[in-house]
Amino acid sequence: MGNAGENVKTVRKRRGLSQRELAAASGVSLSTIRKLEQGDREGARLETLRMLAAALRVPTMRLAAGPHEEDPSTATVDQWTEVRNAIERPPLTVWADDEPPTVAGVRNATQEISPLFSGDEYGALSVLLPRLLQEADALGPEGRAIRVRLLQLAGWLMVQTRQFSAAETALERALDDAADRMEAAATVNTQCWLLLRQGELSRAYDLAVKWADETEPKISRATPAELSTWGWMLLRVSAAAVRNSQPGDAADALRFAKAAAVALGREFSPENDFLRTFGPTTVALKRAENASVADRPDVVLRLAEAIPAKGLKPTSNNRNRHLLDVADAYAKTGQYAEAFGKLGQINNDSPEWLPNQRYARVILGRVIKGRRTLTAEMRAMADVVGLPF
């Protein structure tokens, strides 16, 4: 965020605030504000800008000079080279060693590897997915539906691992091939998440609002799939709004999402798609996430007590994200042992997912900062999440 510090300084002066007064109003330390205004990029984290924007009464992206993103590690880039090639390069048309792929064969293979996505088994996916993407491309028009599904999953995986360019390509291809509004909305859901992870909050908000309007059903006769699709668009609206210092819009969208969840009455996954699982529990998880973004750790912990997270699968991304929010709330309230315990729980359940979470590094950094000495387990966890000393 090249000019974020200059933007903060300009708006602060227009508000007639000193650096010390802005620190008191925002909760951001005086030293961080000073470093930020002096051009220190380390101070320009999206969370920091959100806190400053709330105090200065401007949208977060007014302060940010551009998208906030953190490049994946060299190891991550190397691991996914073949997947990126399969997404971005022209399809293979010659099958010298084998019989040409068939729709039935690729469909069956896709079903077989689907649990690897929901289970965050990155090692296996990095080996199996490239060939499957190439085979789906080679199917031509008959393989459209399978190709869309694989590109949706591949795009989601690239977002997870912060390979945003490849994610954009995969999701754009899936959207181009979508046959109907519901299939397209499943792709747009992940596109909104991609924009959120890139820090493109206004674009994420506008896209989610557009698709929430387009997919809004008549609740009295809506199908479960329609309620799930609309509900997720509303959750994306809420997520973008709360991050861009629009709490009223965030609350309104969350209220409509709750109405959809109540009408649904349970957690539902259209076509057994774990990425679109929606219902009362999902809304409750996102309500806690919004409280975390708004820096209300007390609310996060209170809401978490009523969320049946134990009933969710250990590899559920919603569940893992929720546990990170809980860990962060513990760390912010000085309950460092509890915070570290949550990180350990996630690592035990989803060891290939946690290292890709920048949020985990932020939380562990808080834990370490609050401790006089570090245990061997904490040092090991720092290696897991890539936190430098």
Image: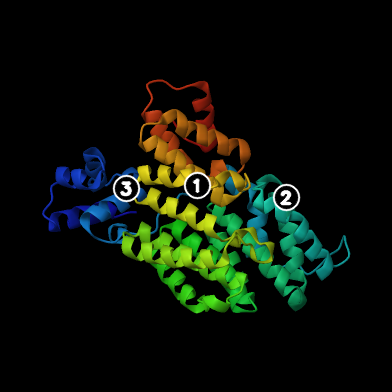
At mark 1, the secondary structure is helix
Q: Is residue 369 above or below residue 102?
A: above
Given residues 75 and 295, the one toward you in this image is 295
Determine whether label 3 and label 2 are within 8 Å by CB. no
Q: Nearer the viewer, mark 3 or mark 2?
A: 3
Q: Amino acid at mark 2?
A: Val
| Distance (Cα) linking label 3 and label 1 | 20 Å
Q: Is residue 143 left or right of residue 371?
A: right
Given residues 238 and 109, the one toward you in this image is 238
Residue 55 shows in this picture = yes
Q: Position of residue 218 (x, y in %)?
A: 52, 79
Q: Which of the marked residues, 3 or 2, is nearer the chain's N terminus?
A: 3
At mark 2, the secondary structure is helix
Given residues 74 and 338, the one toward you in this image is 338
Report which residue position mark 3 lands on: 48
Image mark for residue 338: none
At mark 3, the secondary structure is helix
Q: Which of the marked residues, 1 or 2, is nearer the chain's N terminus?
A: 2
Report which residue position mark 2 lands on: 127
The image quadrant where one finds the C terminus is top left
Q: Amino acid at mark 1?
A: His
- Crowd band around label 3 with a 10 angstrom C-alpha radius: few (<14), some (14–19), many (20+): some
Q: Amino acid at mark 3?
A: Thr
Q: Position of residue 265 (x, y in %)?
A: 57, 63
- Crowd band around label 1 with a 10 angstrom C-alpha radius: few (<14), some (14–19), many (20+): many
Report which residue position mark 1 lands on: 322
Res. 64 image quadrant: bottom left
Q: Residue at x 37, y 62 (%)?
A: 251
Q: Position of residue 373 (x, y in %)?
A: 41, 20
